[in-house]
Amino acid sequence: MSVSSDDLARRVERLERENRRFRRLGALALALAGVVVLTAQGNGPEPVLRGETVVATKAFLLTDGAGHPRASIGMLQGQPSLTLYGGDTPTPRVQLGAWNDGSTLMLFDSAGKERAMVVVAGEMGSLNLIGPESKLRASVGVVDDAGMAFLFGKDGAPTWSAP
């Protein structure tokens, strides 16, 4: 089997793109891990870096070399959130939010439509799966220390539930 130089060049180009993507994701993961470690060291509302200069702002935006947004940390509806973007447009792919008694993790498709959500609020937690028309299709959760599960049809009506 012979492989043309054009095929090899395309393969090398694809591998280089994937390598760059993995390095970027790795760098972001390390940065986020650093933030987690630094914030875990703080006690209460005091600055994490005692004796250091503290930068206070309402939002941070991380962009790639072409200026496309890749991540943001800021306030969303008055609560802190972290958003990761995909593609060359500011399309959200992952969003993590926190508020007084709970938190959410939302996952979006390539068009920016919400597809899955993990919610923790008070004593309740749930995993919700959302269909292409932005309608809830499945939900599994715990409420009042009891498990629950629901499946929903195209019209949004429950088709199955347990217990």
Image (spheres, rainbow, N blue to C red):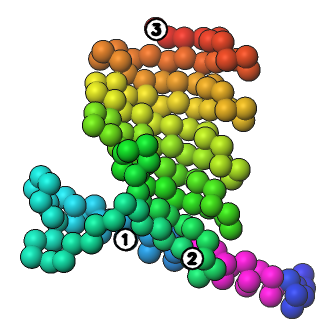
Relative height, residue 85 to residue 22 (above, below): above
Identity, as a three-letter code, of the amino acid under mark 1: Ala
Of marks 1 and 2, the one in the foreground: 2
Which residue is found at the position 67% from the left and 17% from the top?
A: 156
> Marks 2 and 1: in contact by CB < 8 Å?
no
- Reading the image, the residue beneath label 1 is 31
Q: Which mark is residue 98?
A: none
Q: Look at the image and tell me whether residue 132 can be seen.
A: yes
Identity, as a three-letter code, of the amino acid under mark 2: Asp
Q: Is residue 151 left or right of residue 40?
A: right
x, y (%) of residue 99?
32, 40
Q: Give the Cα separation between the discs numbered 2 and 3.
A: 48 Å
- Reading the image, the residue beneath label 3 is 163
> Between residues 15 and 40, which one lies in front from this camera angle?
40
Of marks 2 and 3, the one in the foreground: 2
- Reading the image, the residue beneath label 2 is 64
x, y (%) of residue 143?
35, 18
Which residue is found at the position 41% from the left and 57% from the top?
A: 74
